[in-house]
Amino acid sequence: MQGSALAAGALGGSDDSLMLGFETSDDAAVYRISDDIATLLTVDFFTPIVDDPYDFGRITAANALSDVYAMGGRPLTAMNLLAFPCSMGPEVVGEVLRGGAEKVSEAGALIVGGHTIDDSEPKYGLSVMGTVRPNRVLYNRGAQPGDVLVLTKPLGTGIWGTALKRDLYKDDHPQARAAIEMMATLNKAAAEALQAAEVAEGVHACTDITGFGLAGHLHEMMLASDMTARIELNILPLLEGVWDLAAGNIMPGKTSELIDWAQGFVDFADTVSEVDRSIWQGIVCDPQTSGGLLLSMSEEVASSYLELCSTAVKIGTVAAASEKDFAGMVVFT
């Protein structure tokens, strides 16, 4: 994708205290304050993906807070970013903000301000600041040969969001409701499990699965680490109903673009049929909203982490890049 190239043109200078900026498409900027504290800085916003304004606020806040968790940090403050038409009633806007505030509070953080503009298309998001010990920052690089890959939430939020937008289901449908509640779930518990003494030292790379889908974010991790990944399709966690929706070609408009992009680094084993391959492409390239953490960790540490985080699933392994399996390649078996 072209995000990194665009971002590189916006660089405003350098500072020895800046531990991380644009360079590896990571989840947040990292700025060292002292030997013991670094700040994590991130921002995210988007248009409504569900009809209910309260749910929209909850999901958006969970998504924005996730970047801090993916870097190994703890959120401290957030600022609202709100764009709504003046004609929209204050009750609707109030419900969006209520949903966001509840999630920020659940994270143990504070909303300390924000900014609002008049816009014909509603948008909501947050800028989030958190902290982390400089020696405990988790990057989306550093995966090692023999590592286990772990995912903490099931896939399919983009597919379910599209089904809801097309009115194929109402948001009170049990499977749709489960997808909404999953998107509104913080990655707080998954991140806190990483801080356990027997886990922290063995986590080599981390990111969260969002707009580039599993395939795209895993590719970025493997490319930055000079590694390749092998994923077992039969153990990938999926939201209920996702397979049937994907088989019916229900997917966001962005998915086709991501599938085209992924042709350069994704491969499927010969044992995956052409029909199944087509369905799986739509799932592994499904852009996620408030997706789970993707972790690369030693096998021993993974065993401990899977016991501490009830939603975590081992989905594959990491290997050194070779002439056949180049850096950044993702093979689905």
Image (cartoon, grey):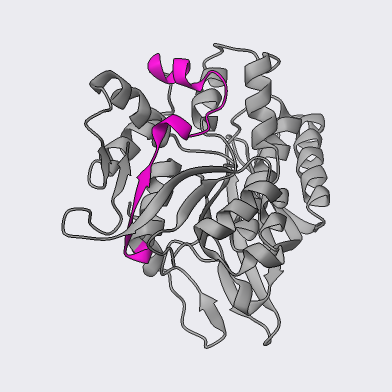
Instruction: Decide: is 107 above or below 171.
Output: below
Q: Residue at x 71, y 15 (%)?
A: 172
Q: Position of residue 253 (x, y in %)?
A: 39, 29
| Res. 115 image quadrant | bottom right
Q: Which residues are magenta?
A: 224-249
Which quadrant: the C terminus?
top left
Report the front residue among 71 and 258: 71
Q: Is residue 296 left or right of residue 327?
A: right
Q: In the visual, does 147 lie left or right of 115?
A: left
**Residue 273 visible, this angle:** yes
Identity of the residue drawn at 46% across and 38% down? 287
Say if the magenta span includes residue 235.
yes
Above or below 151: residue 16: below
Residue occupying the far left of the picture:
323
Seen from the viewer's position, the closer of residues 82 and 179 is: 179
Q: Is residue 207 left or right of residue 177?
A: left
Q: Is residue 196 magenta?
A: no
Q: 20 or 215: nearer the eye? A: 215
Percent position (x, y) of residue 190?
67, 50
Q: Quadrant of residue 59?
A: top right
Residue 144 as seen in the image, left or right of residue 303: left
